[in-house]
Image (cartoon, rainbow, N blue to C red):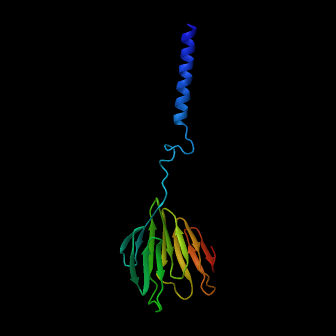
């Protein structure tokens, strides 16, 4: 009888120990981290005329728009303004899907890092009086200094106005 009770207690204790160890998330446990993936460099560029260009790490092309050169390479999307004065302000939109991230250099030299599930609407080349973009989601900006033209980031809840900062 005593041997049976001891066997039952030892067996139950061993079962509970093994079950708890398998079902407790621990740092480094592959089961615990399977749902978390690093962001991929991917985005969708929507030009002012409705053209959609899928961007990813392997993209490598040059587009010209209103005299501005748009270079897509492994580091991101880069706008280089031309010497000619733009005829009007045209806007492009960059959409970052969930699980994505992307880097953008605007025509004035401002650098923008965009996080997953974000969207930015920006002019291909800025006007003479201000530099304004519209952001939904998360973005980190290194704004190029220009004391004559403030840089404005418009969101649903507020507008942030700076002359040059990070």
The residue most toward the top is: 1
Total marks in image: 0
| Residue 102, placed above or below residue 61 | above
- The residue depicted at 46 percent of the width and 59 percent of the height is 99
Where is residue 156 drawn, in percent x and y?
A: 55, 68
Q: In the depicted view, which residue is nearer to us: 19 or 152?
A: 19
Q: Is residue 113 left or right of residue 65?
A: right
Q: Is residue 13 above or below residue 106?
A: above
Q: Residue extending furthest left?
A: 51
- Image-based side of 161 in relation to 123, left or right: right
Q: From the top left corner, tell me how far across and down residue 8 is, in percent.
A: 54, 16
Image quadrant for the C terminus? Answer: bottom right
Q: From the top left corner, tell me how far across and down residue 62 is, in percent.
A: 39, 79
The residue nearer to you, when weighing 28 against 125, is 28
Answer above or below: position of 53 versus 123.
Answer: above
Does 77 appear above or below 23?
below
Percent x, y of residue 131: 55, 81
Displayed quadrant of residue 112: bottom right
- Quadrant containing the N terminus in the rendered view: top right
Who's the residue at 52% across and 86% down the image?
127
Picture residue at 43% right of the left edge, 73% below the top:
73
């Amino acid at each position: 009888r005593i041997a049976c009770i001891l066997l039952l207690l030892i067996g139950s204790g061993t079962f509970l120990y093994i079950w708890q160890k398998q079902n407790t998330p621990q740092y480094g446990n592959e089961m615990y981290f399977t749902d978390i993936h690093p962001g991929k460099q991917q985005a969708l560029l929507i030009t002012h005329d409705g053209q959609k260009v899928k961007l990813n790490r392997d993209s490598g092309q040059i587009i010209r728009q209103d005299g501005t050169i748009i270079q897509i390479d492994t580091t991101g999307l880069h706008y280089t303004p031309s010497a000619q004065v733009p005829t009007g302000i045209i806007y492009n939109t960059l959409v970052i899907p969930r699980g994505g991230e992307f880097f953008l250099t605007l025509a004035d030299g401002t650098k923008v890092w965009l996080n997953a599930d974000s969207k930015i609407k920006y002019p291909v080349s800025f006007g003479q009086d201000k530099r304004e973009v519209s952001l939904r989601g998360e973005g980190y900006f290194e704004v190029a200094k220009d004391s004559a033209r403030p840089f404005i980031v418009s969101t649903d809840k507020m507008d942030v106005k700076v002359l040059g900062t990070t």
